[in-house]
Every structure is written in structure tokens, then in C-alpha cells.
Image: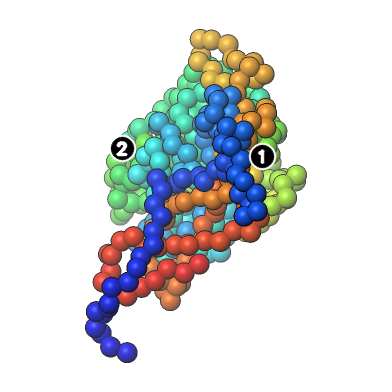
Amino acid sequence: SDVERGHASEPFAWAAFERNTDIILVSQQPSNSPSVAPSSVPSLSASPTGTPVFVGETGRILVSNTIDENVQVEVVFRNAYTNPVVVPFINTRNGVESVSPRVKDVTSTGCTIYMQEPDHQNHSPETVSYIVAEKGRWELSGGLTFEAGSHSTDRARGKGMNFEGDPISFSASFQKNPAVLHTLNTNANVDWMTSLATSVTTGGFQIAQEYAETSTLNDAVTIATETIGWIAFETGTGINSGNQFIIGYYDDGVSNGVDQTQFIINLEGHENPPDIVVAVIGENGRDGSWARGSGTYSSTNQGVYAEEDQRSDVERGHASEPFAWAAFERNTDIILVSQQPSNSPSVAPSSVPSLSASPTGTPVFVGETGRILVSNTIDENVQVEVVFRNAYTNPVVVPFINTRNGVESVSPRV
């Protein structure tokens, strides 16, 4: 009703926690009973046997538009890492235009994920799953082995070129060919770019950047050095920290371009749509491609296309490609059983700490804190879907805007 914003003194209440605090129960205190002594209550920090070692996590976000429309999502990891890599995948197909996910600004506590169309246009909101992994070779509870790393290169492949990637050798061989997931983890190129892995064996693979058909005789592409993050998973199914995983790779021999037939990944066993990342690990099509959701995404199936760009032509037919995938229940924390240096045997799972080994190692979460970046208002169709790190029976949420980048009056809502 007026522009002045003078106001009388008011009492303020506040609560501050370190970033991404999990609020863990010591005791429940009904008003008619005394409190329980802390020494008798389970605690993660009470004993080394109650301390999980996190070597990865999964998550899922909604990305409302592309980086060319100034939309990026700041992802805060639930756990802290020393040297993580991140691989994302677009599960949905709300926009029909070609688009790919990218990662940049990877730190020990978070990263930035965004979408980009090869022609630098806007895009409809899409659901993006991601997997974070600590670099190294690890064995998970449930017996699953994976290795994660990164590689910096200016080698790139475009339409019609024979693929000659840089060779990557695993620190130790897998028993069978692993499922290799990969994505650029930097943003050095001014133009659109993705990644491609091929020639996967038990001992390694080849990797490079992929610019597909975005370069023509009149539109020469300049290749900047990018860092590509990768994770190689032993294939199979199992349970890690109480959460199911399904990992595999396959070439169905059917043309899987957008103009053709979707590739279907069977996810049966999940009650809800899982966090799933899919990648192309071949070069059968001359035009170049990357994995993108086909529009089928549920608790039972993930559909995938070998997506092509449409910068030089509009067709998106593509040869059959081998796809690799890793699916975990939503917001899985990937917990270590043992580290496997290449020159030493693995530790027997029974000798390794586990949260589920004993009730004394089980934390009881009654709250959590977090921080997000909200890029605009609901009147501009911007909302942020927040996924709790823990599950609750009947939660409430209270937010607060910490910054003042815009001078106009604004409030947070839930």
C-alpha cells in the first residue's frame, strides 16, 4: 500500500546449525517422565563400530530450464568427500528438444548441475538423477565393487569421425566388463559438449569429449580441455545400506534413436522410481549420441534414447548403442565395506563396521538442516523440490532467506 518500510523493534528468534546437520535423537522426553541418561542411548559417535564410511550418494533434482536461460541448480551433498566425481542423467522427456545434463564446480561438499541444448535454447523442466562417488576403488556392503576417477582431455569426436579416446586403466581388473558412467565435470567449452566412453573391458576403457553434429564447415568447433568424471560399477543387483541397486549394460540390437524405438531398462523390485543414471558406451552411430530419458520413467521401467543434436539436421534416427546404467533407491548413501588397493586383497565384509550390524550403530534422525539456491519467485514458475536426507513420519519445515541480492520485499514459503 506504500513504499516505506520503517518498522518498530521486534523480538527475533533463531536457530543456527552447521551446514547440512542431521539432528540425531539422544532421548525422547515426554513431559510426564524423566529424561533418559545419554550414556544409554545409541549414538553414531559413541564407537567406531557405529560410524559409516560414505563413498558416494545418489539424488534427484528438478532443473527448470537451461544454462542459456541462466538456470543452474546448486546441489549440496549429504556427505563430505575428499575428491568426488558426479554423473547425472535426465530421466524425463517433458521437452522434446535435444538436451543434455552437465556438471561443474565440483567441491567436497557440492556441485552445480545444469541442462544445455546444443542450439542454446530454453527447455521445459526435467527430472535429473545423479550419482556422487569418491575417487578410488571401493567394495560396498552387499559385495558390489566400483571404481571412480576423472580424466582431463581436449580430445573430442564429432560426426563421422572414428573414435580414438584416451585410454583409462582400472587400478585392478573387474571380473567381467563393468558398467561405465561418464559426464563432463567442468565447463570450459563455450559451446555445447558431452562425453563418450567406448571399448569397455575388464581392465579399462577409452574416453573423450563428444560434440556430435554441432560442428559444420561453417561452424567450426573449438575444443577446450575438460575434466570428465567417470564411475565403473560391477554389474549385478543387491542391497547397500538397506537400499536396493540394479546395475547393468546391454545392447539390444535395435535402433534406439529418438525417431525409433526406446531402450527399456527393467527396474522391477523398486517400490518408487529410483535414482538412475544411464550412459552410452559405444560409437555405432556416426552422428554421435548421448543417453536421455525417452519419457518412460517409473518404479518398474526407465526408457532411454540415444539422443542426437539437431544443429545440422533435424533427424534423430540412430543405430543401436550399448547403454550402461546404475539404479539406486532414492537418496541412497553408498556405504563402504572395504577399500581395495590394487596391490592388496579386500577385507572380509564381516570384519568391517556397518550401521546395520547392531542397534548401537543405528542413528535416530528427528530433523535436519539444509540450504538451497532459489533462482526466482513462484510467479516466474520457479519452485525448488527439496528431498530430505532422512525419512520422517510427520515433518514440518521452516525456511529463511539468508541473503539480500534483490532489494524488493520477498518471503519464503513451503
Q: Nearer the viewer, residue 110 or 199?
A: 110
Up/down of 330 relative to 67, above or below: above
List x then y, in percent, for residue 325.
61, 40
Pointer 1 with pointer 2, Cβ within 8 A: no
Q: Amino acid at mark 1?
A: Asn
Helix, strand or loop under label 1: strand
| Figure colour scheme | rainbow
Q: Amino acid at mark 2?
A: Thr
Label annotation for residue 225: 2
- What residue is disc 1 on? 243
Separation of marks 1 and 2 at Cα, in angstroms: 37 Å
Up/down of 306 relative to 132, above or below: below
10 Å crowding of disc 1: few (<14), some (14-19), many (20+) = some
303 horizontally vs 96: left or right: right
10 Å crowding of disc 2: few (<14), some (14-19), many (20+) = some
List x then y, in percent, for residue 362.
63, 35
Q: Nearer the viewer, residue 90 or 294?
A: 90
- The residue positioned 52% from the left and 46% from the top of the image is 23
- The residue positioned 35% from the left and 44% from the top of the image is 105
Nearer the camera: disc 1 or disc 2 = 1
Residue 11 shows in this picture? yes
List x then y, in percent, for residue 347.
60, 15
Residue at far bottom of view: 1
- The residue positioned 59% from the left and 58% from the top of the image is 395
Residue at far right of view: 269
Residue 98 shows in this picture? no
List x then y, in percent, for residue 298.
68, 55
- The residue positioned 41% from the left and 28% from the top of the image is 166
Up/down of 382 relative to 163, above or below: below
Q: Earlier in the sequence, mark 1 or mark 2?
A: 2
